[in-house]
């Protein structure tokens, strides 16, 4: 009885691992590389930057807060911010459609869009 339970646990664990790897693969390879980093403050689009051009941009919110967006090598990241938790700075660089960097204290969202402006993965 104990050996059968152990065997079933191993089979279940392996099946879940295979399922997780397959799901990761589908998600990873169906997202397309984006074309633009779209900046939204308070839910309104304020800027759109091509990911093909390397640049550094200071984003100033209506309250005077500042985040620094850097686009390099086709990836966008926030490298500095004057918010207290700096979670936006800790988020990894983004480059695929649908990915976002969010700074809640500044009500700032940076998202990646493709050519048509629609998330092609949905």
Image (cartoon, rainbow, N blue to C red):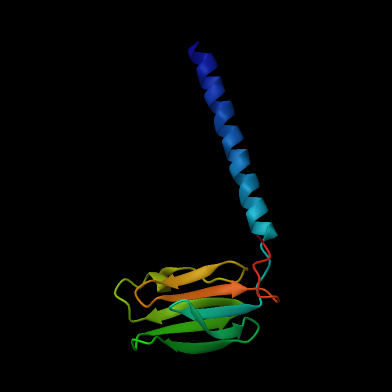
Query: Where residue 118 appears, x then y in whole percent?
Result: 66, 70
- Give the image location of residue 34, x and y in percent: 65, 73
Picture quadrant of residue 38: bottom right
Residue 73 visible in this rendered orientation of the protein: no
Decide if residue 45 is in sight here.
yes
Quarter of the figure with the C terminus: bottom right
> Residue 98 appears in which quarter of the rendering?
bottom right
Query: Is residue 104 toward the left or the right of residue 17 in the image?
Result: left
Towards the viewer: 69 or 97? 97
Task: Name the residue nearer the viewer: 98 or 1.
Answer: 98
Residue pictured at 50% horizontal, 10% vertical:
1
Q: Position of residue 41 (x, y in %)?
A: 45, 80
**Residue in the foreground of this view, choosing between 34 and 90:** 34
Check the image and report above or below for 80 versus 93. below
Up-down relation of residue 8 to residue 122 (above or below): above
- Residue 85 vertical placement versus 64 (above, below): above
Residue 30 location (% of width, % of height) = 69, 59
Q: Residue at x 55, y 32 (%)?
A: 13
């Amino acid at each position: 009885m104990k050996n059968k339970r152990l065997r079933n646990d191993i089979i279940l664990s392996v099946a879940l691992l295979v399922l997780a790897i397959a799901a990761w693969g589908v998600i990873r390879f169906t997202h397309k590389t984006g074309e633009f980093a779209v900046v939204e403050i308070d839910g309104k689009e304020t800027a759109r930057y091509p990911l093909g051009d390397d640049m550094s941009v200071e984003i100033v919110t209506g309250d005077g807060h500042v985040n620094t967006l850097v686009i390099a090598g086709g990836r966008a990241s926030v490298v500095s911010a004057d918010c207290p938790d700096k979670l936006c700075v800790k988020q990894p660089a983004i480059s695929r459609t649908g990915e976002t960097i969010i700074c809640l204290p500044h009500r700032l969202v940076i998202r990646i869009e493709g050519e048509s402006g629609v998330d092609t993965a949905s």
